[in-house]
Amino acid sequence: MRAQEYASWDNPRFAPMREPMRRVMEAYGNAEKWFADIKDRVLCDMGMPFLSDAIHKLEHKQPERIDEFAEIPHDYHLRLMYPGTPELDEDFDNDLDRVFEVCVAIVDGVNEALGGFISATADGEFNALSLKAEELQIANTDDRRKLLEAWAMWNQGGMSRATFDSWCRKLFEGGEDE
């Protein structure tokens, strides 16, 4: 066997991880592009610079997390796949509830993809790889928590969009690692 044959997704040893890994890469790629689209809409259509900035930060976390995830297959000299990203097909119609719903769904999509990878690698030879993916799930949880907190605050009502936008600045900047 040659090194290229060993370090291949066609190798039966690694084949079960191929599709779960691909789904993680797809979810992270979608998240990056879709958060970019949403942040522009929140800024330009809704006039909310601080919420837009928070979503922008979510956008920029995705490539960093791809790099962290890439360490997993790279430990075995396996190449990553970079599936294409479809355009975000959403009409927010100036509806912040829909913005939060979609943002949380994006985060949950990444989490589900990571969960699939963890299921494919846990309790066996690749258990250490699943632990690395679990660390990424933990980071994902903080993003979801802040989105849900902001969404709940918006639903309480009694705030103008400008006041809510300022409140978002405090939530998403407070205690966040830059």
Image: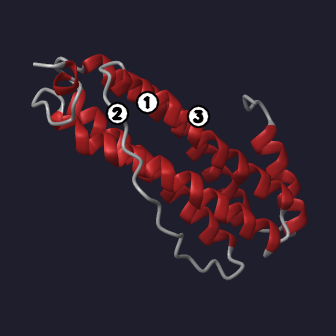
Residue at figure coordinates x 34%, y 27% from the top left: 73
Looking at the rendered structure, the secondary structure element under dot 2 is loop
Residue 121 higher or lower than 161, as above or below:
above
Q: Residue at x 78, y 76 (%)?
A: 45
Where is residue 94 shown, x and y percent of the image?
Answer: 72, 79
- The residue labelled by disc 3 is 64
| Label 2, label 3: how far apart the Cα atoms are | 17 Å
- Residue at 68% x, 76% y: name it: 95
Q: Label 3 sits on what residue type?
A: Glu
One can see residue 156 in this view: no
In this rendering, position of residue 31 left or right of residue 108? right
Find residue 70 and name its label: 1
From where the camera sits, is residue 108 visible?
yes
Q: Nearer the viewer, residue 104 or 78?
A: 78
- Could you say which quadrant of the image residue 93 lies in? bottom right
The disc placed on residue 79 is 2
